[in-house]
Amino acid sequence: MGPSLPALLCLRFCVVQALEKFYDLPAPRFEVEPNYPVPLGRTLILRCLGAYDSFNYRLYKEAVEGPLTINDSCWESMSPVFHYPNVSLEHAGRFRCLYLFHSFWSKLSEPLDVQVADLYEKPFLWATPGLSVPLGETVTFRCNSNVGLDRFVLYHGDPKDGFKIIKPLSIRKNEAVISLRNKTQEMDGNYRCYGYMSSEPHHWSAASDVLVLSGVGLPPGYCTTIHLIHVVLALASLVILLP
């Protein structure tokens, strides 16, 4: 008499478990291009880089903002590159990927957030006391929205060459305030800001106009020194002119 069905099922389960442990596939490296908010209609590329000679890849969209149907949350490809030439709202969200190798699926990748921009009008960005700020001084950026956005992010640098993300310490109604104290030369360069709603963290506004911060301003104390020199010269002139 052969083994019973429960025994065969148990044996199969044990074999699969052993194989999965043997093929303990590491999670893939997950990359996005570009790595900044993608404007509507532009190109988005997601790369799921797994083990060599993998031949199947899956992309999952997590339900961050609400429930998703299976058709909206899973994409499958024979290529590790998921190419979307015309970004739309469905591409905004948090994603993970995994790959198939020798009939076994890998672990899920780390999550990756894709922000889609141009969904709200651009916020207004300005700086005080201005854009020519001496070294060691403080410059304050304000990013203001007319459409009720309640979250803001300031970008420093050029997205193509690398940039730094600066989150505000305080947000007032429709406005973020970001102060950069003890200004250094590294703080010079391009600045732009985006806004979004806290209830929809992947739906971003268009980028603000770019502000260019420079160190053309005079060093601390320079104006005071020049002013005192002018006063001394003026007094000396008066002494000479007086009888």
Image (cartoon, helix red, strand yellow):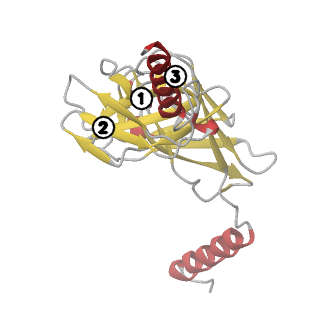
Badge count: 3
Q: Secondary structure at mark 3?
A: helix
Task: Tell me the CA gap for discs 2 and 3.
Answer: 46 Å
Residue 117 in the image: x percent, y percent?
Answer: 41, 24
- Nearest the viewer among 11 and 140 is 140
Query: Who comes first in sequence, dot 1 or dot 2?
Result: 2
Q: Which residue is mark 3?
A: 233
Q: Quadrant of the C terminus?
A: top left
Q: In the figure, residue 151 lies in which quadrant?
A: top left
Labels 1 & 2 near each other (Cβ < 8 A): yes
Which residue corresponds to the image point at 61% horizontal and 59% vertical from the top-left? 107
Residue 197 in the image: x percent, y percent?
Answer: 27, 36
Which residue corresponds to the image point at 62% horizontal and 86% vertical from the top-left? 1
Instruction: State the mark number for residue 215.
Output: none
Q: Which residue is mark 2?
A: 176
Q: Which residue is mark 1?
A: 193
